[in-house]
Image: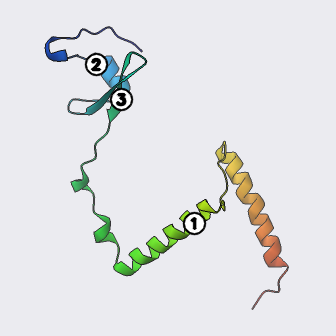
Amino acid sequence: MTALVKIRRSGQVTLPSRLRSAAGVVEGDLIEASVKRGRIILTPKPVMDRSKFPTADDEYTPEQRRIIDARLAESTEDIRAGRLHGPFETHEEMVQFLHHHTKKARGKVSAQPRAR
């Protein structure tokens, strides 16, 4: 979708309502302006009002925070060591992968005697 707009005094531009609607921007939204290969690119930049959301400090105890930090460190190390799977092209591909590895894991567990 394109539109012809006029640059006014002080560089002001009015974006037609159909363009604003298509981009999902409304009055007061922030738009990033950049120049690439002689074209002006306008990109909507959503801004969150963080006061409407609780902080993580209110959600977790120090012990829970230590556990979360330790797990994050462990997952970061897994990524660095290449212990990860994917990316997958589709969700079907991911589900197939999970089913395959679940069957492998069940085979290993079933070979061991079950405790009763």
- The x and y percentages for residue 60 are 35, 73
Q: Which residue is mark 2?
A: 17
Residue shown at 74% from the left, 59% from the top: 99
Earlier residue among tags 3 and 2: 2
The circle on residue 102 is none
Disc 1 from disc 3: Cα separation: 35 Å
Say which quadrant the N terminus sits in.
Answer: top left
Crowding around mark 3 (Cα neighbors within 10 Å: few <14, some 14 to 19, many 20+) is few
- The x and y percentages for residue 69 are 44, 71
Three-letter amino acid code at disc 2?
Ser
Earlier residue among tags 1 and 2: 2
Residue shown at 28% from the left, 10% from the top: 5
Secondary element under disc 1, as helix, strand or loop, is: helix
Q: Is residue 10 above or below residue 90?
A: above
Q: Which residue is mark 3?
A: 43
Secondary element under disc 3, as helix, strand or loop, is: strand
- The x and y percentages for residue 44 are 33, 32
The circle on residue 77 is 1
Residue shown at 77% from the left, 59% from the top: 100
Disc 1 from disc 2: Cα separation: 49 Å
The quadrant holding residue 7 is top left
